[in-house]
Image (cartoon, helix red, strand yellow):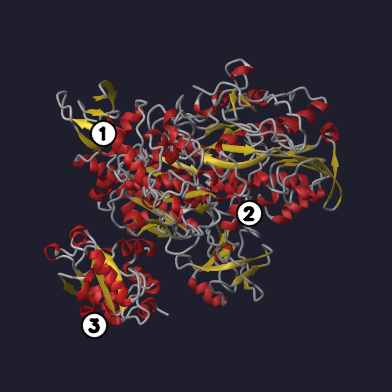
Amino acid sequence: MSEVSQLIEALSVEEVDAIEAEITHLPDRESAAIEAMRIVQEKRGWISDESLRAIARLLGMPTEALDSIATFYNLIFRKPVGRHVLMLCDSVSCYVMGCDKVRTAVCDQLGVEMGETTPDGRFTLLPIVCLGACDRAPVMIIDEELITHLSADSIPDILSGFD
Amino acid sequence: MATIVVDGVEFEVDEGQNLLHACLSQGLELPYFCWHPSLGSVGACRQCAVIQYADADDTRGRLTMACMTPAKDGTRISIQTETAKQFRASVIEWLMENHPHDCPVCEEGGECHLQDMTVMTGHIQRRYRGRKRTFENQYLGPFLNHEMNRCITCYRCVRFYNDYAGGTDLQAFGSRDRMYFGRTTDGVLENEFSGNLIEVCPTGVFTDKPFSESYTRKWDLSSAPSICAGCAVGCNTFVSERYGRLKRVHNRYHGELNGYFLCDRGRFGAGFVNSTDRIEHVGERVEDDLFDVLDGEVGIAKLAEMIRQGDVVGIGSPRASLETNVALKTLVGEAQFCTGMSSAEESLVDLIIQTQRATSADIPSLSDVESADAVLILGEDVLNTAPRVALALRQTVRNRALNLAGEAGIPQWQDAGVSSHAQGRLNPLFIASVLPSGIDDIAADLAHDVPLNLADCGFAIAACIGEASGSEPGFVRKAAAALRSAQNPLIVSGTSTRTRAIVEAAGAVVAALESAGKVPRLLLVAPEANSFGSGLIGGGLDMNAALQRVASGSTKTLIVAENDIFRRAERERVEQALCTVENLVVLDSLDTPTASLASLVFPAATFAESTGTFVNYETRAQRFYCVFEPRNAIAPSWRWLAQAATDAGRDDLGWRHVDDVLEAVAASPNMAGVRAVAPDAGYLGSSLCKTPRETPRFSGRTAMNANVNIHEPKTSVDEETPLSFSMEGLNRDQPSALLPFVWAPGWNSNQSVFKFQQEIGGAAAGGDPGVRLLASGSIGTMPARSASVRSDGGGVDTGFRLIPVQAIFGSDELSSRSPPVVERSSAAFMIFSPMDAERLGAAQGMGVSCSVLGATFAVTVDAAMKSGYVGVSVGFTGAEGELPDGLIALAVDPNYRPTPNPHDRVIARG
């Protein structure tokens, strides 16, 4: 099996093409590491060991070095996540404005703890430090939608909008 | 020099340094974790915080990291002020938050930098009562334990392993307080210098696995300064013992050679000393494979009788000390003495010595290697034959960054600044080799070919240096241009392909550079710890001549000192000789094929149980001291020989002590320098002033043998060396050659090494050990290019031509009998070109049998291998000895089953 076809077994042709397109803008292949993982995660939701190895090969870097980058960033997922990723801010402003109560409400509503995924694969709950919306605290982000002025009471309504 | 003021006291310090370096140099106590003299500063741990004042009127000052602040003239700082002390105490408190406090069961306990720094900062009460983060540890192979919970995130491991040693499979993962240092998955750490993590890690994350299997605290170890027996570099080591067993090997700092680091062959290859294959008694063969144990005196009397009868030939060994070799040579006479190297190897070592003498180019120490700015490696696989040289070459190449930083005004110790400014720019390294090597990643250009063509490549480079013609292939032209434009060009070559023309070509390149007005350096590698010693001693017979003489029946007795002749010549030749001779006397430490054919066997002491001298590739003679007294009848080979000779009525071997033998060694040509190598037994004149091998806290002395005898045995008196087998004595101010371990008040770990240096990272206190036997400057004539016999490669129908391939783990005789090295090494292998493999019907994972070598080899396919040639793992089963010259028939072995790789075993997570 050729090297390219081995890669494509783990990555799709579209993914490889998109990563190669990124590389053309950069001084060397390794510099595309973060963007490459974003591209792969966009379709697959997370970066599996297999994807990691394939990306590392494509970029010509050790798997360890890529994993070091992957595990550093909290928005690159090295475990499968639910259909929706809910990230609740727990930094100072949101803490002052009562994010603890919001967290309890979310966890109660979904029956899982922070860092876990609901058994039906609907939500993954994660903490995040600051979404840049301190003036509207407490806040969370579900997928790419920022939700502000949270309260424990507003949670059931908000969550029902995501299935 | 700069004047800095520390807590109101003025100090003269080196202006190019940072404040941490400057303070430690002045003997001031300032705690640190992430800084390392060889790795520079990154300011990661925040432990070396001090208060810096703007001027004499500034009473408030500001907090600054000493390791990240230049020691400029007029700098005013305080280490002792309360704010600084409090800050440092809180740093250690948060570093210790997740630390498990498992010191009683941790191998680092008692020699832990984290313990020392914790005590130094005064953080003695734990306040944190929360849960600690915990990790799963990984299986990292036979050399290292992994205990991640102990980590304090100083990043030293990855900075050493990746940046300094070029490893790729150890990384920092995660962020915040969940940083993890390990591999992506469990598996063997692949880098050849992984063992240094034991000493680089400031706590017990990476610990010595073989040592922990039979563990002893540092304070209970008995140690002596030693020299690694693993290759011709001669790295300085501390070797430690308890209960008569070798426990571990640690780095002994040598400013010009090994610095702070050893290779894994050296660190883990000494396990053969504890082997169950040790010969421990004098034995007389009664029938095949059966020996009767003789009393030592009886054995000596029998050997004396053989000596009296005359017709004795002696074969020495490049893995034995100068003392043993000279003893045997004196006993049998020069004309009857063979150095013990194979004929091919001996002629190469002679050629190397002749070349080094003829050229005015210096033989570089490893610190000289690091200062080169363009390097050509010609045909030598240094990573596998002299591994520490390869680690030095990594620094040679990286040091481009230091030059660039100097031009940009960035301090040399500013590690992150220096490397990001360099943007990956390296000093040029050109590698011409048979196969890809482990340092190809730092090469500017590579050429792969069969040995004689590599030699041609070398001669072409030499020619190209002389004339500015432009018709050569790219590699030759580029290498010549780089060497010609360098300030400090370096040529590295050696014996590993057994090709004279390669060494001659290296000499030609050096000569061409000299003609071009350059001052090049020439590093030529030979395989064993004392290859150069053997070469300088010389003998009247080369191996083939010696074996022929013995096989002709004119020799009554053959004495072999610490040598397995089957590794030195082709099998039939050896068998013929050893089976013809009436008396075969073998002195050796391990049971070998040669020893098992002997009529009389004497148990020889290893480097750990005897005192002696090795000569390294620089022709630097260095002393290893006896670490512990050998068990049973084991004694140094020279002693057996001297006693038997004296018994036989000879009056010229009446040596009682190793120093007497050394006098005889010093009387030999080229050897006058050996007296000054290290202190002799009379050092300081009094038995009360001997250097103790045991630490001041040595425990259990009265009880450690209580299972045998409840009375404390009398401490043995060491008449051989300036060291004592006790805690008593004077352990201060001795030269580094006599330093048994490093330990300083408040500094229990090996980080105390800076207390034993003239300056941090400079020469060892009392001077770097060893004496070079060959003076620099040209004597004699450069060997001319010999007419090499061109022989083409073969093929499937005609047979293949074999090329020796070296392996760090497995090619060396003694270390390949150390259990962790055995576990780390592969099966015997052969390397084919893809075309030959296909024609032969072989593929990776299959086996090929070779009837000439009488063994089966695992198949490896490498696109760089030239068709018609096959690389063979020398030193491995089937390829222990000299490889045959002709074309060799190979066939796929249908019954071959790859030995299960111990690395693939089910992993017990610990």
Callout 3 environment at 10 Å: few (<14), some (14 to 19), or many (20+)?
few
Kindly identify which chain the residue marked by label 2 belongs to. Answer: B
**Front in this rendered view, residue B76 or B460:** B76
Residue for badge 3: A160
Q: Position of residue B146 (x, y in %)?
A: 49, 54
Q: Residue furthest front?
A: A153
On screen, residue B691 above or below B871: above
Residue for badge 2: B882
Q: Kindly tell me whether residue B278 is visible in this rendering.
A: yes
User: Alpha carbon of mark 1 to alpha carbon of mark 2: how far?
Assistant: 68 Å
Task: Kindly identify the residue that appears in the image at 49 percent across and 43 percent down.
Answer: B262
In what quadrant of the picture does the N terminus of chain B appear?
A: top left
Label 3: element kind: helix
Task: Kindly identify the residue that appears in the image at 31 percent across and 30 percent down.
Answer: B22
User: Alpha carbon of mark 2 to alpha carbon of mark 3: how far?
Assistant: 78 Å
Q: Which mark is residue B83?
A: 1
Q: Residue furthest right?
A: B286
Indicate the quadrant where residue B51 lies. Answer: top left
Evaluate whether label 2 is on the same chain as label 3. Answer: no
Label 2: element kind: loop
On screen, residue A21 above or below B553: below
The numbered mark, 1 or 2, whose residue comes first in the sequence reads 1
Q: Position of residue B3 (x, y in %)?
A: 24, 23
Indicate the quadrant where residue B474 lies. Answer: bottom left
Task: Kindly identify the residue that appears in the image at 54 percent across and 46 percent down.
Answer: B105
